[in-house]
Image (tube, grey):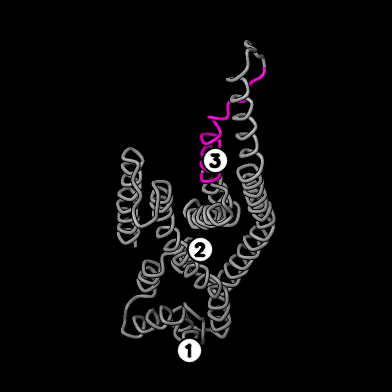
């Protein structure tokens, strides 16, 4: 899994880097390709770098959540079977007949290994390596230790299932609470975009016209050393800086949203892409560039 993730990351960075480098070359040569300017290519390259690793991480994390969501149900069923005097291995085989969503196939595979004569601890370790999620790692380690120590494994399994469910509820509550702050970030970003559009389409052009008119009138006037002057020639630079700030703000706010919602930087890459590309398209379509 790590190799696949690294491949996607390196490929995205490579393609995105090429697009951004092409954008820089277009800037130096004052080129336009297929109606796209240098800033379009730089934004597109940055979007590629953010999009594919972000999508992969979200899909992988979603799979983990689906697996971990049904783990307490499986542990509870194994514990119930154990209360009828079954060993851990027998309880796992009995419980494997149930339906546990994304976890079902792995449980059936583990039960088949036990039926073939594989020791239950070894089967659990193999199950842990295949599923390989943080919650499964913790729970399987506790079960193996409890089984090795002997005693009533059913009670341990019940406590582990309860602890797993409590952990999931806490994570869900945290995610809901943090989603409010993420929504505030997204709202602030789009309000900032609206401000940039107003400035770039209304205020700055009028300032440029006024500054140019003042400069032309002074050029035909005998008055010198006028203390007030509007540097209208800097307006295009100011408009560009506003657009650049929206790109930086979109990526930064998106990354922060991912950290707030899931506590993961890579999840924030997808949200960064979403704010970046939506903000850039809004500026494009609204004439704010």
Q: Secondary structure at mark 3?
A: helix
**Is residue 104 at least partly visible in the picture?**
yes
- Residue found 47% across the figure and 78% down from its top: 102
Q: Nearer the viewer, mark 3 or mark 2?
A: 3
Few, some or many C-alpha atoms within 10 Å of disc 1 (few <14, some 14-19, many ≥20)? few
* Residue 116 percent across, percent down from the top left: 31, 84
Q: Nearer the viewer, mark 3 or mark 1?
A: 3
Q: Secondary structure at mark 1?
A: loop
Q: For mark 2, what is the residue?
A: 135
Q: Of marks 1 and 2, which one's residue comes earlier in the chain?
A: 1
Q: For mark 1, what is the residue?
A: 97
How far apart marks 3 and 1 lie (CA) works out to 57 Å
- Residue found 67% across the figure and 61% down from its top: 176
* Residue 174 percent across, percent down from the top left: 66, 57
Q: For mark 3, what is the residue?
A: 245
Few, some or many C-alpha atoms within 10 Å of disc 2 (few <14, some 14-19, many ≥20)? some
* Residue 56 percent across, percent down from the top left: 41, 63
Q: Secondary structure at mark 2?
A: helix
126 up-or-down from 220: above or below = below
Contact, mark 1 vs mark 2 (Cβ under 8 Å): no
How far apart marks 3 and 2 lie (CA) works out to 40 Å
Magenta stretch: helix, strand or loop mostly: helix
**Is residue 263 at least partly visible in the picture?**
no
How far apart marks 1 and 2 lie (CA) works out to 22 Å
Report the label total: 3
Work out whether residue 257 or residue 273 is closer to the camera in this orientation and state it. Answer: 273
Q: Quadrant of residue 202?
A: top right
Q: Of marks 3 and 1, which one's residue comes earlier in the chain?
A: 1
Q: Which mark is residue 283?
A: none
* Span colored in magenta: 228-247
């Amino acid at each position: 899994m790590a190799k696949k993730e690294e491949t996607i990351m390196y490929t995205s960075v490579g393609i995105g880097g090429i697009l951004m480098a092409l954008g820089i070359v277009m800037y130096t040569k004052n080129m336009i390709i297929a109606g796209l300017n240098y800033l379009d290519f730089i934004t597109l390259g940055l979007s590629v770098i953010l999009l594919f690793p972000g999508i992969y991480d979200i899909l992988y994390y979603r799979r983990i959540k689906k697996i971990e969501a049904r783990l307490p149900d499986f542990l509870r069923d194994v514990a119930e079977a154990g209360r009828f005097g079954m060993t851990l291995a027998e309880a796992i085989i009995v419980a494997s007949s149930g339906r546990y969503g994304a976890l079902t196939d792995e449980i059936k595979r583990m039960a088949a290994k036990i039926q073939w004569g594989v020791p239950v601890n070894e089967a659990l370790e193999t199950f842990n390596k295949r599923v390989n999620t943080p919650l499964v790692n913790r729970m399987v380690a506790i079960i193996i230790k409890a089984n090795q120590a002997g005693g009533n494994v059913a009670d341990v399994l019940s406590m582990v299932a309860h602890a797993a469910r409590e952990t999931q509820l806490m994570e869900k509550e945290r995610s809901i609470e943090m989603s409010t702050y993420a929504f505030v970030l997204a709202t602030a970003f789009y309000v900032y975009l609206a401000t940039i559009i107003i400035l770039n389409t209304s205020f700055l052009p009028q300032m440029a016209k006024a500054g140019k008119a003042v400069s032309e009138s002074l050029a035909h006037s005998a008055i010198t050393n006028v203390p007030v002057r509007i540097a209208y020639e800097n307006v295009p630079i100011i408009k560009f800086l506003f657009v650049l700030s929206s790109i930086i703000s979109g990526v930064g706010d998106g990354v922060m949203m991912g950290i707030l919602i899931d506590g993961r930087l890579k999840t924030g890459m997808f949200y960064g892409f979403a704010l970046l590309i939506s903000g850039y398209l809004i500026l494009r379509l609204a004439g704010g560039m």
